[in-house]
Amino acid sequence: MSIDIKRDILPTSAPNVPNRSMKPKYITVHNTANSSKGADAKMHARYQHNGSGGRKASWHYTVDDTEIWQTLEDNRQGWHAGDGGGAGNTQSIGIEVCENSDGNFDKAVANAQGLIRHLMHKHGIPIGNVVTHKHWSGKNCPHKLIGTWDEFKRGISGEEKAEAPASKPSKKPTPTKPSKPSYKANLAVDGKWGEGTTKALQKALGTPSDGILSGQLRNNVTESLYGNTARFGGGGSVVIRALQRKLGVKADGLLGPATVRALQKRLGTVQDGKLSRPSLAVKEMQRRLNAGTFLK
């Protein structure tokens, strides 16, 4: 695909722009959720220039079946991921794929895949860091792509589905291999929840492994957890939400007593809802992360 990008960059003084720089590490894919006729890439660029309807909403590229419009420089933050000061807003390029009824959605998807390939090469972003809006905030977006997300990513990589020749009998199914253990770490078992423990937990849960629990680094999370709730930006923490889903508690991204109590119960330690320093629960979590058996 030949990348022809029309630029209509928002001024840094615009009220719907954070006006902060960033180094892009992720690409976040959205659908516009606007099927109206004429709701194409140019219209959505104009929408942002008109103030995004009073919302704090801004993103980098809008793609339709014929055009790509850029409204933020790649190294400027937008408001599109719904995670407050989290990595979705502060470290990712936002791409909206149009679904206007008078356009060709499949062609818009193909154009988006070509753009993502271009941006991955330009910024050194791996395919594993191409994520959905849902990845950051839990919102069902991109709603037209989530159900075929793996296929969408294969299209970015240029991989084709292998088709079995019709003339040959199908092969016997390959025996299912036992699932691999979760990520093995090499942590000091000190009961302190620092950057290393955060990275290991992120890898075990399949979230971005940057050692950051939101938009800020928390080297000593336990200091704020004597029965209180640790808050990480407006959208909470992605890794804490993933942990909460594993524990079966409300996935709000806030590390509070209920989540701590559930973690302690799962790990077989005292269930007081607090993480003192050092913490028995954190020690046991570190042991299991080292063994690759966390939350098995």
Image: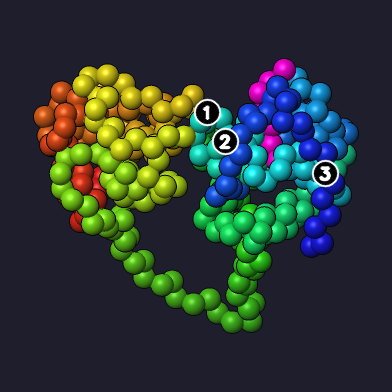
Label annotation for residue 84: 1
User: Could you say whether the residue bearing mark 2 is in a helix, strand or loop?
Assistant: helix
Cα distance between the residues tagged 1 and 3: 26 Å
Task: Name which residue lies at 88% across and 34% down.
Answer: 38
Q: Write down the region rendered in magenta.
A: 54-60
CA separation, marks 3 and 2? 21 Å
Evaluate if marks 1 and 3 touch, with contact meaning CB atoms under 8 Å apart: no
Q: Which residue is mark 3?
A: 7
> Image height check: is 84 above or below 207?
above
Looking at the image, is mark 1 or mark 3 earlier in the sequence?
A: 3
The label nearer to you, 1 versus 3, is: 3
The amino acid beneath tag 1 is: Gly
Residue at image mark 2:
89
Q: Nearer the viewer, residue 140 or 257?
A: 257
Position of residue 123 measured from the top left corner of the image (x, y, whole percent): 62, 56
Answer with left or right where residue 29 lies relative to residue 34: left
Is mark 3 in CB contact (under 8 Å) with mark 2?
no
Image location of residue 267, percent across then percent down: 17, 39
Asked where in the image residue 37 lies, by quadrant, the reply is top right
Question: Residue at (42%, 34%) from the top-left corner?
Answer: 216
Determine whether 81 is above or below 25 in the image: above
- Magenta-span inclusion, residue 176: no
The residue type indicated by label 3 comes to Arg
Question: Which sits earlier in the primary sequence, circle 3 or circle 2?
Answer: 3
Instruction: Identify residue type, mark 2.
Output: Asn
Per the image, label 3 sits on a secondary structure element best described as strand
Total count of labels: 3
